Amino acid sequence: MTTIALLGLDLILGLIAVALWAYAAVRAQTSGLRWAMAGLLVVLVRLVTVLLLADRGWELAAERVTVGVPLALLAGTAALGLLIHARRRNRTGSTAARTALWCAAGASAVSLVLTGVVGYPGWPGAAGHNHSHSGGVAVTDLRTPPIGAARKVELVAQTQAVTLPSGRVVDAWTFGSLPGPTLTARLGETLEVTLRNRDITGGVTLHWHGLSVPNGEDGVAGVTQNAVFPGDSFVYRFRAEQPGTFWYHTHQHGREGIARGLYGALVVQPASGSTAGVDLVLPFHTIGKTAILGGSDQVQREVVPGGTPVRLRLVNTDQQPRLFALTGAAFRVVALDGVDLNGPTEVSNQALRVPAGGRYDIAFPMPASPVRLSVEGARQAGLVLAASTDAPEPEASQPTTTFDPTTYGTPKPVPEMTGEFDGSTTIVLDRLPRILNGRPALAQTVNGGVFPDVPPVLVTEGDLLRMRVVNRSFETHPMHPHGHHVLVLSVNGRAPTGSPLWLDTFDVQPGEVWEVALRADNPGIWMDHCHNLEHAAAGMMFHLAYAGVNTPFTHGPGSLNTTE
Ligand SMILES: [Cu+2]
């Protein structure tokens, strides 16, 4: 049974138990005994369920195992005992028995409240966090000094009516085009990007998703800078130190800004220059109800002679995971999140599940027959590669299996990530009623709290940190630590058997437990958050904060910065 099924079963059994005990109380004088026995049976099945859950991950069931279910079991057993006792004495109307039955119903209800309202590890501390202590280094000092030889780019954030290839016009917010221009740099080159805001009244920033830039260049409103308002500008500088596929987007009210079009791709080519053959960057985005692959809302065609090496860089800029499929050719998954995989082998007829914010690079030699790239749920948009313009379009395929990165490629030692851990932290993701921005809401929580009232994960430069991420909710959370890639240690207790997996965005699906390692080698105050930005805006963010680093910027009420 899957963990998510166990979580669901526990909830349903809890509700049934409450109903059975309550009904037993109502029918105490007649058929109450039968209903009470059914209630006790259900609580016993719940006990088995929560023990199975605890075996999958203690944090999934802690309060259920220690308090919730024992309480329900105790109250239920006592109520049943009293009822039997009353029956023996022929006092079917016993008030004590009836009260005990109501108490049993209440105990089962309390166990549900513990899980659904209090959560784990219990009610968060009321205190928020505050980095603006004196001394140490400010995030504004953690920047790249100007150099003359930088590759200079200007991006102008603006409202724009964009006419898509289908003729459809969308009212977008862009960095000049939809998507923004693909930025490229060679390994080792310094990029200098001037951001200007023409008329995005809510403000913008530029965040370099997946790139380990200096903290002051990370573009997070309210943490590493103030949002850039109309008429203002900000200059970002960073050395491209990792070859691979990345993307950029606003990190000021990104839930709205990215969805409306404030994003683009960023490719760092190897020092030797661009790779031979065809190299296409394909961000997938949904604006309104229109799906766009690359820059098109239609099936685009590219003429590619047979035998040409092809590299497709798939970027998911949406809020949900997307399933990509390639029909007509076997391929290799050569990189995830901008990091090459070791020993990639041929894959065919498998869907690629790319997390929100994640990147998959695939490569294959062009076959003689046409090839089609499609995205599930987006029939209109797609890509066809063919040797001639009149070759028939292959049908979009629907693979029945999904590619599993944890069993793909060849293992290889990662010496820089072995050795003693200097610290460990547990991040529990859940959906709980909380006060969010001053209003009650069904929030997306981290360790029972909502941003900014989530204590930061504190590290010292050089630390090797083990991070355990547990998803108690019924939704997928693509967790994105800024400024670092993490090495996957295990998913649901199983270590990867293939290539080392270095990710900057990992989908923690409902009921999943991930363990990852992070080397604290990039000082700063870094966001770590769910990249479903609906969830981030609903509280699912926290800071990874280095000792001795502070920020002068503020976010939330009373500030113009909206961090997500
Ligand atoms: Cu989420």
Image: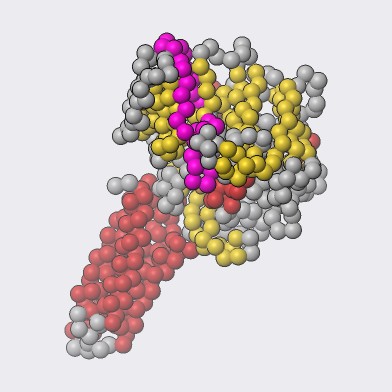
Identify which residue, 134 or 149, lies in the foreground: 149
Residue at 66% over, 36% down:
175
Judge left or right: residue 216 versus residue 467.
right
Q: How is the image coloured?
A: secondary structure
284 in the magenta segment: no
Is residue 50 positioned above or below 328 on the image? Answer: below
- Using the image, determine if residue 177 lies above or below residue 392: below
Percent of width and height locating residue 435: 59, 63
Is residue 297 shown to the viewer in this render? yes
Give the residue at x 45% y 62%. 116
| Residue 150 picture location, percent across and down | 75, 21
Foreground residue among 298 and 60: 298
For image coordinates 53% across by 31% down, the residue present is: 294
Q: In this view, does 318 lie above or below 439?
A: above
Residue at coordinates 56% horizontally, 54% vertically from top-left?
538
> Does residue 307 belong to the magenta stretch?
yes
Figure disc tally: 0
Left or right: residue 463 compared with residue 26: right
Magenta stretch in the rendered image: 285-313
Residue 358 visible from this viewpoint: no
- Tell me where residue 267 appears, x and y as whole percent: 60, 24
Residue 191: name its quadrant: top right
